[in-house]
Image: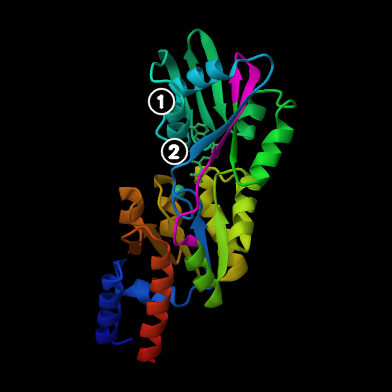
Amino acid sequence: ATPTSIMVGTGRAAELGVLFRKGDALQQLQQARVIALDKTGTLTLGRPELEHVSPVNGFDREDVLRLAAAVEARSEHPIATAITRAGPADLPTVSEFESLTGLGVRAKVAGRDLLIGSPRLMAQNGIDLAALTAEADLRASEGATPLFVAIDGKAAALLTVSDPIKPGTRDALERLHAMGLKLAMITGDNARTAQALADKLGIDDVTAEVLPDGKLAAITALRDRFGALAFVGDGINDAPALAAADVGVAIGTGTDVAIETADVVLMSGDLRGAANAVEISRRTMRNIR
Ligand code: ADP
Ligand code: MG
């Protein structure tokens, strides 16, 4: 690899909004066999909207939404923002708020105990979801994320949120596939939800319901199966995976921690930048040999 051709490649990438932070990354990216991608904020906009509220066990829709919105106002998770946006402006006071990373949230509000989050969180707390699983599975297989609300230890409602696919994602993945790369998704989201999106986008492999400290293990497993790996992510919880990947690619509109950890930054946040990056790395290295 001549320093000049690397400079040229890096410069051309920069014109397309792809920042190679080391010449090394340009060389390593062309060796990648698999591109692993985070889901929320990377493949999708990362701005989910509340779609459905299905109360059970005699709970009232507006009551549940008001209590859930109050609790989620304390969380910065995109799911929390979706729920709070859908609630009323005037929210009751919350105490004993607790965020359970990768699972959900818990707090006291208006004298009740609220638990909001994933099926796993509900199972851990002995909440009986029998009245809600059929609908949750159906909506998840349509691509929505199912969340459960439990009040005072009883299932109160199913909430579903849906996060649109980013413009550019479909095109980017088609181009990466056409270059012979395997595509994998790594996400903390529900397995059915993740699989539905993977089917829509033609993604080859899905690792779902990964807790934040599990993303690293997922990277290692994918590398053992497919070979050299690039990981694309945007979140704080993606930083370990970005560091562990052969090439870490951060979404430029993502969190500072992800951007600082990455070897390559896609300035616009558009995934087509990842396809451009691979093309440029291959072209540059071909010229060199
Ligand atoms: P992702 O890979 O989508 O960023 P996270 O690890 O942030 O995944 O979240 C995984 C799951 O944990 C979510 O799909 C949801 O079920 C649950 N969860 C996380 N934070 C919250 C929250 N504030 N309210 C409700 N559920 C949450
Ligand atoms: Mg993300």
Please check the rendered image and state whether residue 151 is part of the magenta-colored stretch, yes or no: yes
The spot of residue 63 in percent (x, y) is 54, 15
The spot of residue 246 in percent (x, y) is 45, 67
> 10 Å neighbourhood of mark 1: few (<14), some, or many (≥20)?
some
The spot of residue 235 in percent (x, y) is 41, 48
Q: Nearer the viewer, residue 158 or 219?
A: 158
Q: Provide the residue designation for mark 1.
A: 73
| Residue 24 appears left or right of 169 | left
The image's mark for residue 78 is 2
Which region is colored magenta? 149-169
How far apart are the two marked residues, 1 and 2, measured between alpha carbons?
A: 11 Å
Q: Which three-letter amino acid code belongs to the residue tagged 2? A: Pro
Q: Which three-letter amino acid code belongs to the residue tagged 1? A: Ala
- Quarter assignment of residue 265: bottom left
Residue at position x 35%, y 62% from top?
Answer: 266
| Residue 226 appears left or right of 2 | right
Q: Is residue 78 above or below residue 92?
A: below
Cβ of disc 1 within 8 Å of ligand 1?
Answer: no
